Image: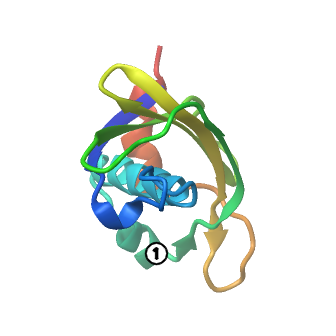
Amino acid sequence: MYTFDTPIRIHYALTDQMGVVYHGHYAQFYEIGRTEAIRNLGYTYKDVEAMGIIMPVVDLHMKFIQPARYDDIINVRITILELPLHHKMVFHGEIYIGEKLINTGTATLYLMDAQTMKRVTMPAPLMEKLKPYFEV
């Protein structure tokens, strides 16, 4: 299992008229978390794209438990529970304020060849970085 946490401070532009974070921004928070989780492995999305791979989101689910507000610091926790052996990666997310869980979500991304738009397996260099987290 691979887990990585990314803190994000909520700025005013992310809030709505009710003073809470607009619900649509949570998808971006999870994207930031996924991006930073991959960066922590030593690669950027740009690096993956340079390998000829794109990773579109094909499924996204979220559950809103409590709101975040202006100036809160949220912690976006991304977990990969299973080594992606085929064409898809499932990212499990949790968002916290301190120890309080405020949102959960999952995002399924497909690994696709950028030229052919066909599903492919994970590039070997990235797979090698992930494997140690799944060894027993």
Residue 13's place in the image compared with 74, above or below, is below
Q: Residue at x 60, y 31 (%)?
A: 82
Where residue 48 sits, quadrant-wise, is bottom left
Residue 127: x %, y % from top left: 47, 47
| Callout 1 crowding tier (Cα within 10 Å): few <14, some 14–19, many ≥20 | some
Q: Identity of the amino acid at label 1?
A: Glu
Pick out the residue farthest to the front.
18
Residue 26: x %, y % from top left: 51, 52
Pick out the residue farthest to the top.
136
Q: Residue at x 28, y 42 (%)?
A: 72
Which one is in front, 94 or 20? 20
Residue 75: x %, y % from top left: 33, 37
Which one is in front, 28 or 118? 28
Residue 126's place in the image compared with 92, above or below, is below
Circle 1 is placed at which residue position?
49
Where residue 111 sits, quadrant-wise, is bottom right
Apparent side of residue 2 relative to residue 84 in the rendered image (left or right): left
Find numbered disc 1 in the image and state the secondary structure of the residue it sits on: helix
Apparent side of residue 72 relative to residue 56 in the rendered image (left or right): left
Apparent side of residue 109 relative to residue 134 in the rendered image (left or right): right
Rendering colour mode:
rainbow
Q: Residue at x 34, y 19 (%)?
A: 99
Residue 9: x %, y % from top left: 25, 50
Where residue 6 sits, quadrant-wise, is top left
Q: Residue at x 41, y 44 (%)?
A: 128
Query: In the rendered picture of this protein, how many numbered marks are placed on residues?
Result: 1
